[in-house]
Amino acid sequence: MSDFEIAPSLLAADFGYLMRDIKAVEGKTDYLHIDIMDGHFVDNLSIGVPVVESIRKYTDMFFDVHLMLTNPEKFVKPFADAGANMITFHIECTDDPEGLISLIKSFGLKAGISIHPHTPVEKVIPFVDKVDLILVMTVVPGFGGSSYLDVSDERISAVRKALDASGSKAFLSVDGGINKKTIKEAYDSGARYFVAGTAVFGHEDPGKAVEELRECITMS
Ligand code: DX5
Ligand code: ZN
């Protein structure tokens, strides 16, 4: 049993063959990371509720929905109804993180909180024992294929320290630029949940890519 998880990021899949790509990783991991972008909080658009609802019919994978949008309160119920298992919102997008965590949990879902690399990491520390996952963005959010930012390691370590100090069992997740070169560095800094888009779906065999990423930690 390993002490970490890999979550392929659907953003890097072929949207014309979504279920083919999901089936390629199903069985290699339980987790699927799904980015929802609004063109306001981030400079990009991705998918919305109907797509999540559609793919829910064909897989039992754990849907880790990453809301990269303003007014996240408005979208909790729609994504809960569509079949999300966890909803992660950005700390920059709400004035009431505790209320939003409660709202997400009221639907029986796990709750996550994410932080943009330009936001002081201290902002999420008060919530480490209130959520199921803390997502430290390791690139400026909005696009796949960006490079892992150098500032990430110290930010991950700071959250790791806070999690351990509070006794929280929440996952410490990283998202952006995670690949065979960077995953171990993020692990050593304290991350235990690795979102990977390009490194998985850019590989000719996405299932094998998940195994190879896992081995970068377990075989080192
Ligand atoms: C980026 C998204 C990521 C994205 C990661 O803003 O939140 O989930 O898919 O893509 P890679 O792994 O290619 O950096
Ligand atoms: Zn994401």
Image: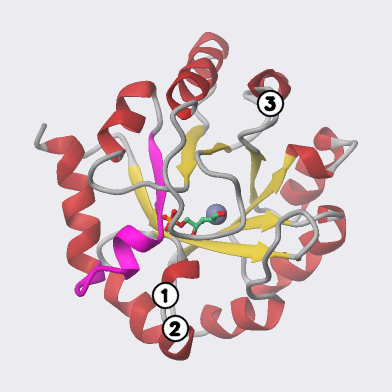
Residue 114 position by quadrant: top right
Which disc is residue 67 wearing?
A: none
Residue 61 position by quadrant: bottom left
- Mark 3–mark 1 CB contact (< 8 Å): no
Q: Is residue 41 magenta?
A: no
Question: Residue at coordinates 46% horizontally, 18% vertically from top-left?
Answer: 157
Which disc is residue 13 wearing?
A: 1
Residue 145, how many percent across, how many down?
Answer: 43, 58
Residue at image mark 2: 18
Examine the rendered structure and indicate whether residue 176 appears above or below residue 171.
below
Report whether the residue tagged 2 is closer than 8 Å to ligand 1. Answer: no
Question: Residue at coordinates 17% horizontally, 64% vertically from top-left?
Answer: 208
Q: Secondary structure at mark 3?
A: helix
- Mark 2–mark 1 CB contact (< 8 Å): yes
Residue 107, how many percent across, how many down?
Answer: 74, 56
Label 2 crowding class (10 Å Cα cut-off): few <14, some 14-19, many 20+?
some
- Span of residues in magenta: 192-206
Front residue (pair 206, 27): 206
Residue at image mark 3: 124
How far apart are the two marked residues, 3 and 1, measured between alpha carbons?
30 Å
The amino acid type of the residue labelled 3 equals: Val
The amino acid type of the residue labelled 1 equals: Ala
Residue 187 position by quadrant: top left
Examine the rendered structure and indicate whether residue 60 appears above or below residue 143.
below
Q: Secondary structure at mark 2?
A: helix
Question: Residue at coordinates 25% horizontally, 69% vertically from top-left?
Answer: 206
How far apart are the two marked residues, 3 and 2, measured between alpha carbons?
33 Å
The amino acid type of the residue labelled 2 equals: Leu
Residue 48, how many percent across, how many down?
Answer: 69, 75
Examine the rendered structure and indicate whether residue 185 appears above or below residue 63.
above
